[in-house]
Amino acid sequence: MAERAALEELVKLQGERVRGLKQQKASAELIEEEVAKLLKLKAQLGPDESKQKFVLKTPKETLTGKYGEDSKLIYDLKDQGGELLSLRYDLTVPFARYLAMNKLTNIKRYHIAKDFDIAGNFDPMIPDAECLKIMCEILSSLQIGDFLVKVNDRRILDGMFAICGVSDSKFRTICSSVDKLDKVSWEEVKNEMVGEKGLAPEVADRIGDYVQQHGGVSLVEQLLQDPKLSQNKQALEGLGDLKLLFEYLTLFGIDDKISFDLSLARGLDYYTGVIYEAVLLQTPAQAGEEPLGVGSVAAGGRYDGLVGMFDPKGRKVPCVGLSIGVERIFSIVEQRLEALEEKVRTTETQVLVASAQKKLLEERLKLVSELWDAGIKAELLYKKNPKLLNQLQYCEEAGIPLVAIIGEQELKDGVIKLRSVTSREEVDVRREDLVEEIKRRTGQPLCIC
């Protein structure tokens, strides 16, 4: 134990030395030498079995070759010491590498505010349906407007390209062109496929007959009867899974939010089955709003082969997941708040405990403690004798909805003056009733005694 602690200290000191050299912009040779020493110490240290940390650290070379034409969205840079680094495009590839390195075959992962993944061998479409259910729940709870989740399957796309006459070598590049149909017209997409990517015009026309179709389970059933598509094994498997998926989505009560869209291609190379993408439904801009053009707000799909790329024995772990477009959603929310001239709340505080006169700090501390003990999110200004106006202005700036005001007269009468920040309405509330009144106004569950 003592030996490990000493080794951990050496690793820490060597890590600090490497960081210091990088900050000093030392020579690349010296940094490489010290990094090698650090790696040697870490190898001696080995993993700590007592600490199960979920950490995604990814070498740059791991990211390359996994995203197809979307690889241009990976940004390369060098640190002070000249070490080549990259900004990760997403966490799917690092997650797959983590599974392979740790020999995990069954896990459900939620990355705070962004990603959700399910890994493991399960019956078809049950995890996929859960991912879509979660995506719909998140977007509905955010109240950013009506949305539609487009679904498709890479096997259907590959089967469709095959029967239309696209050569295997052009599958992914044509897939990338088709994926632009939500942004540009079919004619522009066709011109790109023919003019830039060398596809025969008649092949492009056959693709166009398919990719301009969208609908629900009835379209799936229609394509299952398609004389050409139904003869392709890959497409048939994909259509069969989509039909099953729609059954589960109906049971989850979200089938009205889902559209089977043959133009959805998702250009990432690692997808192997169902793919999906959520888009906001455009509505006429309200007064003061610019038309929203943010693209998709969530997306994901099945990537059954990615873990096997990192496993030394090529063992595959089926995976499916989704990612939420946090930055795009923020831009929508911020724009709408600006249009409505609403302030963004910078705190979850429900009530500020304020004083109307001087020398009431002790009373404020007593009251805020009572509110904390009752589960109320309360705070007070860290001043002995703050001016009432300053306290009220703080509430307006921070978006705190209520103010509990203590004054000499209120103390004599055994009441607290409760003020609504937005309406400026004030009412006297008996001190013993204050908690219940705050909970009532803020929508918290009331105590049943």
Image (spheres, rainbow, N blue to C red):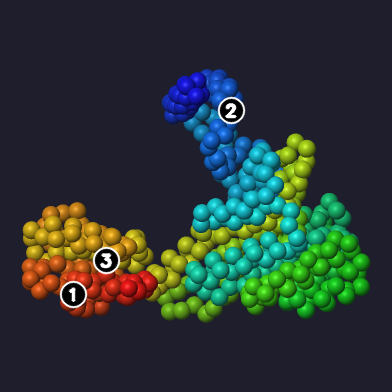
Task: Name the residue that disc number 2 marks.
Answer: 46
Residue drawn at the location 49% of the way across and 31% of the way down? 80
First of labels 2, 3 by sequence position? 2
Crowding near the residue tagged with mark 3, few <14, some 14–19, many ≥20 C-alpha atoms within 10 Å: many
Residue drawn at the location 70% of the way across and 71% of the way down? 248
First of labels 1, 2 by sequence position? 2
Task: Name the residue that disc number 1 marks.
Answer: 430
Residue 142 placed where, x, y %? 49, 68
Residue 407 placed where, x, y %? 11, 68
Q: Mark 1: which amino acid?
A: Arg
In whole angstroms, how far apart are the C-alphas of marks 2 and 3? Answer: 50 Å
Determine contact: label 1, label 3, CB under 8 Å.
no
- What label does residue 105 carry, if any? none
Crowding near the residue tagged with mark 1, few <14, some 14–19, many ≥20 C-alpha atoms within 10 Å: some
Q: Is residue 52 left or right of residue 245?
A: left
First of labels 1, 3 by sequence position? 3
- What label does residue 351 carry, if any? 3
Q: Mark 2: which amino acid?
A: Gly
Where disc 2 sits, the SS reads loop
Q: Quadrant of the C terminus?
A: bottom left
Q: Mark 3: which amino acid?
A: Val
In whole angstroms, how far apart are the C-alphas of marks 1 and 2? Answer: 62 Å
Q: Is residue 261 left or right of residue 424?
A: right
Q: Is residue 87 left or right of residue 421?
A: right
In this rendering, is residue 238 above or below 108?
A: below
In whole angstroms, how far apart are the C-alphas of marks 1 and 3? Answer: 16 Å
> Can residue 170 be seen from the camera position used here?
yes
Residue 442 placed where, x, y %? 34, 72
Determine contact: label 1, label 2, CB under 8 Å.
no
In this rendering, is residue 8 above or below 442?
A: above
Where disc 1 sits, the SS reads strand
